[in-house]
Image (spheres, grey):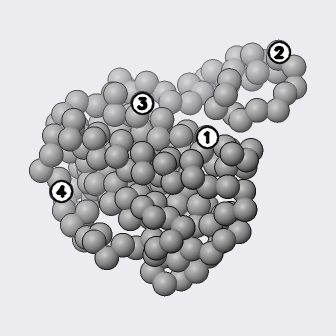
């Protein structure tokens, strides 16, 4: 596997792990909470991500990313599932994505794939999905922070700890690695 594909996997894994860390801070009821009737719960976002991932990454190089069997509208109906079932959907979607990435070679990145009959390189399709998933994981984190309020445990550099964090980072020699590897 090429370094570029390994880096792509690490980027996706980073966003998955941010979601995972958010879910650990939430109980059964909180995962289905939404601020108003026009908003999405975390559970609904999970349903949508699952549907998107299964559609986009199943038979990735050979068939359109918008599968005929996908029911996108159904993804936006509040789930009648519990936290455990929703997290199974979350894992299933990410598994599909990582399995597809495991099959890619460097040469595949310049191939053309289609989403709703619109062609783009594999590299562009990956970038599209990475941005899409980061957007939704950001929503998940934001909702989680709203729900947990003062009990929220930071997923990045905690407030007022940037100086100490940077001091620790700069105390190490320069190196080449992905930011999640430290």
Contact? badges 1 and 2 (CB < 8 Å):
no
Q: Pointer 3: residues within 10 angstroms few (<14), some, or many (20+)?
A: some
Q: Which mark is residue 78?
A: 4
Please tell me which of labels 1 and 4 falls first in the chain: 1
Q: Residues within 10 Å of mark 4 (few under 14, many from 20)?
A: some
Q: Quadrant of the C terminus?
A: top right
The residue mark sitting in front, 1 or 2, is 1
Q: Secondary structure at mark 1?
A: helix
- Marks 2 and 4 sit apart, C-alpha to C-alpha, by 48 Å
| Cα distance in 3D space between marks 2 and 3 | 27 Å
Q: Earlier in the sequence, mark 3 or mark 4?
A: 3
Q: In screen coordinates, is 93 left or right of 64? A: left
Pointer 1 residue: 10
Which SS class for mark 3? helix
Residue 81 spot, x, y in % from top left: 15, 46
In the orientation shown, which residue stands out farthest toward the bottom? 117
Q: Position of residue 135 (x, y in %)?
A: 48, 55
* Residue 13 versus residue 99 in the image, above or below: above
181 and 35: which is toward the camera: 181
User: What residue would you read off at disc 2?
Assistant: 171
Q: Residue at x 67, y 28 (%)?
A: 181
Residue identifier under label 3: 21
Quadrant location of the N terminus in the rendered image: top right
Outermost residue on the left side: it is 80
Q: Tell me if 114 is positioned left or right of 20 in this view.
A: right
Q: Earlier in the sequence, mark 2 or mark 4?
A: 4
Calculate the distance from the C-alpha at mark 3 to the C-alpha at mark 4. Answer: 22 Å
Point 39% across, 27% down: residue:
152
Query: Distance between the Cα atoms at labels 1 and 3?
Result: 16 Å
Within 10 Å of disc 1 (Cα), the crowding (few <14, some 14-19, many 20+) is some
CA–CA distance between discs 1 and 4?
Answer: 30 Å
171 up-or-down from 87: above or below: above
């Amino acid at each position: 596997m090429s370094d570029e594909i390994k880096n792509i996997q690490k980027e996706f894994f980073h966003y998955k792990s941010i979601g995972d860390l958010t879910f650990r801070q939430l109980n059964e009821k909180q995962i289905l909470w939404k601020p108003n009737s026009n908003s999405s719960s975390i559970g609904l976002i999970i349903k949508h991500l699952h549907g998107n991932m299964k559609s986009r990454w199943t038979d990735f190089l050979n068939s359109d990313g918008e599968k005929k069997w996908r029911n996108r509208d159904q993804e936006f109906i509040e789930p009648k599932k519990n936290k455990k079932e929703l997290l199974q959907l979350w894992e299933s979607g990410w598994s599909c994505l990582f399995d597809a990435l495991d099959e890619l070679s460097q040469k595949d990145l310049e191939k053309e794939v289609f989403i709703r009959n619109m062609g783009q390189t594999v590299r562009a399709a990956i970038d599209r999905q990475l941005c899409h998933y980061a957007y939704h994981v950001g929503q998940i984190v934001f909702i989680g922070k709203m729900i947990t309020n003062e009990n929220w445990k930071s997923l990045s550099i905690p407030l007022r700890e940037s100086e100490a964090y940077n001091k620790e980072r700069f105390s190490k020699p320069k190196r080449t690695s992905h930011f999640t590897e430290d």
